[in-house]
Structures are given as structure tokens and as C-alpha cells.
Image (cartoon, rainbow, N blue to C red):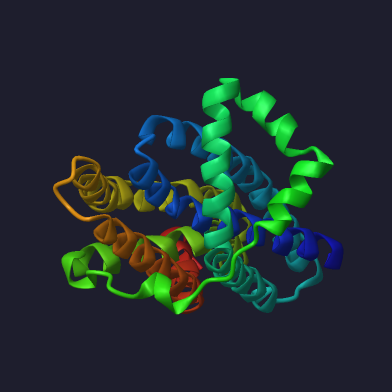
Amino acid sequence: MEKVLLELLVLTFVIHLIDTLSYSVRLNSVKSGQFALSFSLFNLFVLVSRTANTFQAPLIGSIIGVSIFHGIDPINDMRKVIFASTIGSLFGILLIPTFLRVFDVAVKRLETTGSIPSLVVEALQVSNIKRMMKSATRPTKTMLQRLRYREIPKRLLMINALVTGIYTVGVLAANYSAILVTEHQRIAAVGSSGMINGLATILLTLFIDPKSAMITDQALRGNRPYEDVKALVVLLIATKLIGTLLGQIMFLPAAKVIASFYGS
């Protein structure tokens, strides 16, 4: 089971690393003015993250299944997975300056090649990998100065932290709830993970995406300064990190709430 747990921790780390980096795409699209190209390339990162996400549930299910068979409580393993999401988000934050440099070059190359597969093959060449490593940039305090944080709605940030918390523990809580219900209700309890993540998606679609898109579009049209988008991205990333920490608090209550619907 230790091997499965390690694979799950690495997978969770990668998913949240990519998700965190994806927030910064807004900065590149506004700064370069190449909105469509930026998001076309961004979809590649989303595809990698979503593909990795499909492997997460079977690994969690495997750990829960073995735990039930041996009569042990895997709550510490689940908390380690949540912690991996926090570490992945933190590493994503540290890599954003480097990612933006590489992403800017990649968008320009995409305009030349016109093909994402060709761009991927080109990026995997040893010489280009070395070049990307040399372009590594450390975050600095100056990146956070003179940002208009007060222009970003506080409700947007609170909802983003909440949604991140739900996404972080949704599959974990649903699978863990199988331990808290009777044997004939376990499959139903585990299946509720889709409903939980669906709720998070609805909150994201209704409250976060529209406001974030509006601020980005206003900056693209010149109606808002670039610093507003930068403040938006910084605060969304910060609340995402907070959301993964919030997941530690939400996990067990969420599992118990799920179990209560199916009888304990």
C-alpha cells in the first residue's frame, strides 16, 4: 500500500502544481495581448492535469479498499494526500515567474509552428530543456509591490478558497466515507464524489470565472491597469493555497456528512 500512497502523493502534487501555474496564464494573455493563443496552449496544461486526475480516484479507492479489508483507519494517509496538494500549490507559486517566461516563449513559438504537438516535441529536446532550466527566476518582493488589492472583490476570494477546499477533499472524503457506512452502501457513498465536485464546479462557474474574466477583459481593453490582473492572480493563488489548508479542516466533517446520507 505504501507504493500506491507514494504514487497518489506524487500525482496530487502534480495536479495542484499545474492548477496553480494555470492561474498565471491571465497575466501572459493581458501582457502579450495574445489571449486566444495563450488559452489554446493553456488547454494543454489542463489536459495533463485532468488526465492525472482520472488516475487519482482508483489509487484512493485502492488504499480505502485495503484499509477496510485489514480493519485500519487510513485517515493519516488521506491527510498526507491533502498536504501534498498544499505542497504542490506552494511549489506552483514559486515556479510562476519561471513559468511565465517559458510560457511567453512557447506562445510565440506556437504562433510560428501553428501546432501544439510540434511545440511539445520541440520543447522536449534536450537543448530546449536546458534553456528552460537556465531561464529559472526566483520570486521577488517587487513582484508584489504597487498592486491594487483593494480593487479585487473579497467575496470572490472567499469563494475561491471554499471551492478549492471542496475540490481538494471531494474525492478523498467520498472514498473515506465508505469506511463509515454499512457494506451495502459503500459504492453509493464513493459515487457521491462526482456530485461534490459538481457542486464546486457550479460555484466556480457562477461566482469566480465570470468576475475573473471581466477583470481580465477590462485590462485587455485598457479600461483597467495590468496591475489589477496581477493582483487578481496573486490573490486567487493565495486563496487557493489557503483552500488546500482548509481542506484539512473540511475533510472529516465532509466524510461524515456524506456518510449520514447513506446511514452509518
In the rendered image, is residue 120 in sight? yes
Between residue 46 and residue 35, name the one nearer to us.
35
Between residue 16 and residue 63, name the one nearer to us.
16
Which quadrant holds residue 13? Answer: bottom right
Residue 48: horizontal and vertical position, in percent?
62, 41
Q: Is residue 33 left or right of residue 248?
A: left
Residue 120: horizontal and vertical position, in percent?
69, 33
Which quadrant holds residue 8? Answer: bottom right
The residue drawn where x is 78% and y is 58% is: 7
Q: Is residue 247 left or right of residue 15?
A: left
Q: Is residue 257 left or right of residue 110?
A: left
Q: Is residue 228 left or right of residue 30?
A: left
Between residue 177 and residue 207, name the one nearer to us.
207
Which quadrant holds residue 113? Answer: top right
Residue furthest top as drawn: 114
Residue 259 sits above or below residue 188 on the image: below
Residue 202: horizontal and vertical position, in percent?
31, 47
Residue furthest left as drawn: 223
The residue drawn where x is 55% and y is 45% is: 103
In the rendered image, is residue 190 in sight? no
